[in-house]
Amino acid sequence: MSEVRSAALAEQFEDLDQQHEASSLGMWVFLATEIMFFGGLFAGYSVYRGLYFPGFDAGSALLNVKVGALNTALLLCSSLTMALGVRAATLGKRRELATFLVLTILLGLTFVGIKLGVEWHHDYLEHLAPGINFAYEGPNARAVELFFVFYFFMTGVHALHMVVGVSILAVLLWMTFRGRFGPERYNPVEMAGLYWHFVDIIWIFLYPLLYLIGAHH
Amino acid sequence: MWFGFPLRPEQASTIAQGIDHLYYFLTAMDLFFTGIIFLTIFYFAIRYRRRKKDETPAQIEGSLPLEVAWTAIPLVLVVVTFVWSSSLFIRNARPPTAATEVFVIGKQWMWQLQHPEGVREIDELHVPLGRPIKLTMTSEDVIHDFFIPAFRVKKDVVPGQYSTLWFQATKPGSYHFFCGQYCGVSHALMRGEVIVMQPQDYERWLSGSKKAGTMADAGARLYEQYACITCHGTGKGPPFVNLYGSQVKLQDGSTVVADDAYLRESILVPSAKIVAGYEPIMPTFKGQLSEEQILQILAYIKSLGAAERKAGQE
Amino acid sequence: MAAHVVAKKTYFTVFATLIGLTALTTYVATIDLGPLNIVVALLIAMCKASLVVLFFMHLRWSSRLMHVVGVAALFWLAILLALTLSDYRTRPWTPAGKPWGTSNIQFNR
Amino acid sequence: MSTTAVAPTTGVNYLNAQYGIRSWLLTTDHKRIALLYLGSVTFFFLIGGAAAVLMRLHLIEPQGALLEPATYNKMFSMHGIIMVFFFLIPSIPAVMGNFLVPMMVGARDLAFPRLNLLSWYVYIVGGLFTLYAVVAGGVDTGWTFYTPLSTTYANGNVMAAALGVFITGFSSILTGLNFVVTIHKMRAPGLTWFRLPLFLWAIYATSIIMILGTPVLAITLLLVALERTFHVGIFDPALGGDPILFQHLFWFYSHPAVYIMILPSMGVVSELVTCFSRKRIFGYSFVAFSSVAIAVISFLVWGHHMFVSGQSVYAGLVFSALSFAVAIPSAIKVFNWTATLYKGSVSYQAPMLYALGFIGLFTMGGLTGLFLASLATDIHLHDTYFVIAHFHYIMVGGALMGYLGGLHFWWPKMTGRLYPDGWARFSALVIFIGFNLTFFPQYILGYLGMPRRYAVYPEEFQVLNVMSSAGASILAVGYLIPLVYFIWSIRYGPPAGPNPWGAKGLEWETPSPPPTENFEEVPVVEEEAYAYGEKEAHVV
Ligand code: HEA
Ligand code: HEA
Ligand code: CUA
Ligand SMILES: [Cu+2]
């Protein structure tokens, strides 16, 4: 039923099988390191959110929840297309795989476009970029600034991961056209899928933590 | 002392001896286990040295009773150590309420100390024998650390917050204090002397020193100079009497304890927490008052009486 | 090497649930529940993340080892958050220093 | 001295399979990568050691004999950074781990050979950044990069050094990832978990720390860089941040990192003690599980570096209790090693001397860790020379001894040559004596109250400082002797044969130096590790 066999059995199988297991284990372990990487940011965020809640509340209220929700939806869509792409790859449906890869890339790019082009740009114009042009009048200005430090850094690192993901998918697309994948060979697609979903999960947490604190205003 | 060679610093505070006893216990434990390990290794290594080139000894898998024993014994020992050291630590952590407060400001690379009576010192601290002294410390730049080996006390001096340290000297004399936390180029020069004097000598020293009036007086002068009085003396702002350490009701319904940090914040960022029943009209004094002046105002506010429970000691 | 093939329908169902949960969390955030807001938001986020991990990332059909890796990562993250926050949360109980501007830290949200 | 007939090393092996600089720089052979690492960590050790020598010379006089205070500060900062991140953390994992993990599991290579080469390059790039920081004027933050000193006030090359450490972190992550996957997925048939050599258990535990700890250091250093570049207040209270948060994040990695340094050494010692007493290790599963226990508990104790920082008293109590807990598995190991000698057939070749030195010095260093884990005594001892002595006893007396022991043990396997055993034993003795002379006085200095990171100090501390400096010069000689005879042995050493020590373990079943593919056929394992005394280890 499952593609994974017990460790003792694996050695008796083809090279490819052992390799598949090794690379998915490698990928999961890599994702574990990514969790800890973002984990440092989440720890900092939680501490300051606790210390300076009113400022974080006020800062969050300055974000546009609608855009955030739209982006969440886009990213979830891209996760769906990615999952369908992996499925197509497993079944050896090359045309379908290519289609889904293209869709995923487009959705990912739209996300990054909205994030950087619309939101960041807007925040910049509103003088909300700490260290560059931050200017905020009102109580708790320091805490609001701190909120925006975390906002920009967390979404920035996330966007960077998106860009890396899109680049990987682009390579995969090219490889698909070159006929590199088939029902026997879809390992890279699967691994890229894991990565892509992981980046999605990070956003699933960023969205409420950054956008929704101040949504009740 | 060991052949005239010091093995521990002077015991010059009430807590020093307790710490030293724990230290002796730990040393004994250390020597005991090190001794056992070294001796056993030597004994085995000689007794079971290889005699023939290709001999093969009988194999031993291990022994559960032994494993349990050498897990349990250290476990018991560390539990004892933990309880002992933690109770000492907790006892030493809280300054006695009667302690005389001395304010300390660390900056790259000097210590500025100020007695409540107004005497200021640089890199030198005169204290009376047998009276608890509490240092309220902050830093103007990086993290420093106030360390008096002879008293066995040490505490980081962190910018952005007040930290406290207390001691009660038991022996007259002059003892080093050091900056314990690396703080930049002249970290090693950021040291000075604590001079413990008989109380009467101390009083003489105090009255003989130049001083700008007590800290509270200085604070009172600032209170007028910066026009705090125009609001806080008129009812536009809350009065300061018995404010320190009291529970303050805020506009948003919560309460805070009026401790050092809260008062400091109220002066520098008045908008952060608004007292219930008042308008948020107080201007900020950020950039106008130095750390030292803030401490003086704090001393003034404290001199106007404090609530029963001291700040931060719920 | 036969991989597990999941029916498309499953993916679509999961996707619909995810979108639904996003709408839910956005809506709930507009109601002022006080300290509960963050709890609800994180619970919903965890549900969403679990769905993605279990279905999109096929953890449901993966070996125990992968489960262990996933759980370990979360466990370590929990260590980091819990012990760090334990310091900040207990500081007001003690005379230990607390950062200015945060007197009487209120970790209720 | 060997149980196996000395076979001349003829035929093709991994060293002579290909020639030319490119064949080394582009190799994906784990054994060659191990040698690349060996060269690079030795280089960094010498640099870090040179800084140590300068420091010790300087401290002969209370007013400082040699350097400006600012220069002295740069010395210990660079000494700490280089020794920790560029020498000790990669030392055993990247040199011996790389060489041995595939051989010990009976595989041809690690799971991801190209990733392995990449991690060496990443390490080198990180190293170059750090060297740049050194050459361009040095860093002066201490290896701990405490804020706001590092973000706002220090004017050395903080960015370059932090970036160097950041980059090297990824090398560590990749190495750990490779080991975990290899140990899980590439074991030879029959090699079950409880037949693994203890070195692999130790490496596995180390990899857990590398994988889950290092990313937090990476993000922390990024935050420091961000604050330094944009002057936003993440850690600087003047800008609204909290400097103690930095310490939490830093020590979340850097405490476990000290076990990255000691666990592999413990693994090496398990191999040495068994081989040179020809006995199965006493209490195999206890030693194995204590490695994992140390790795896990190590993540729960970081606050013991912050007892006087302004951390809450309650958190301090928790961290203190957990720090005591981490001592228990270490104790279990020490006792089991000692018990392994019991009724053994103990011989004192050089590697064994290093191993025994490790056990003794680690015990002394570890037990002084308990002084520091006790809240009450740590208040006095924190940031004094007592701490310096504590960790040098463990890192130099322990970890470095283990590293040298391992190097002496597997050198014949790596190069196919023997070094002069007499010299090796002599240098072990010199190191042991020099070491104790250098660092024992520092315990006393620390209790007397001499703070660390002091370029000048009160006169009453001079005698002990001079003793320490004298010891350091003996120590330096002790380290230079092996350097000489190792290099000598590459050309002139007698051939070693596949198994000069009569040791058990898959790596001893192939010729020395091993062929590129390690084993001609996939070995099948049919017995437990360290099956001394029973039939010969059976390899099909
Ligand atoms: C390889 C490195 C290494 C290792 C393994 C350890 C191991 C331990 N360390 Fe150490 N430590 C450092 C490297 C290391 N340390 C460094 C570099 C610093 C300073 C960093 C800086 O500030 O620059 C430091 C600082 C440090 C501090 C902070 C001091 C301060 O700054 O105030 C503390 C406090 O708890 C501590 C404790 C311990 C403990 C309890 C262990 C334990 O794991 C030790 C366990 C071992 C034993 C206990 C010995 C064997 C046991 C027996 C023989 C049986 C008997 C046992 C019992 C009775 C329990 N260490
Ligand atoms: C792996 C870690 C490691 C190792 C191996 C060492 C090795 C040594 N260290 Fe350590 N040390 C640290 C890690 C390490 N150290 C750390 C983390 C700190 C804290 C830094 C900080 O505070 O930020 C520290 C701090 C530190 C101090 C305290 C400085 C201070 O606080 O003021 C001292 C002082 O004596 C010292 C001494 C030594 C000595 C004498 C050695 C000896 O064992 C070194 C022996 C080696 C040699 C002698 C090299 C021999 C080679 C040559 C001499 C040839 C020269 C080569 C060329 C010219 C190319 N070290
Ligand atoms: Cu101030 Cu060190
Ligand atoms: Cu530690």
Image (tube, coloured by chain):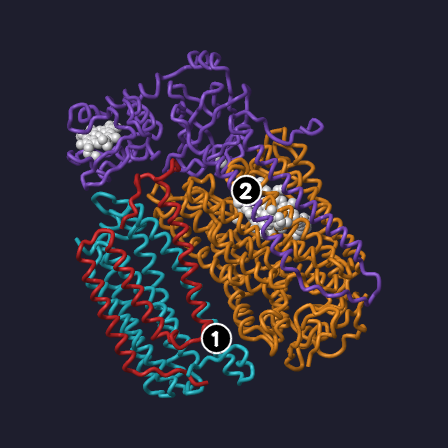
Kindly identify which residue carries mark 1.
A23
- In the foreground, D280 or D50: D280
Disc 1 beta carbon < 8 A from ligand 1? no
Q: Is residue A168 left or right of residue D500?
A: left
Q: Which chain is cyan?
A: A
Residue pictured at 33% horizontal, 39% vertical: C100
The chain letter for the residue carrying disc 2 is B
**Which residue is nearer to you in this view: D187 or A61?**
D187
- Residue indicated by mark 2: B80
Q: In the image as oriented, which residue stretches furthest toward the right?
A: B52
**Residue C51 as seen in the image, left or right of residue D331:** left
The amino acid on which the numbered mark 1 sits, given as a three-letter code, is Ser
Residue nearest the observer in this picture, B130 or A170: B130
Res C105 → quadrant: top left
Q: Compared to C93, does B303 lie above or below? A: above
Q: Position of residue A1 (x, y in %)?
A: 41, 83
Q: Is residue B43 left or right of residue C58?
A: right
Q: Nearer the viewer, mark 1 or mark 2?
A: 2
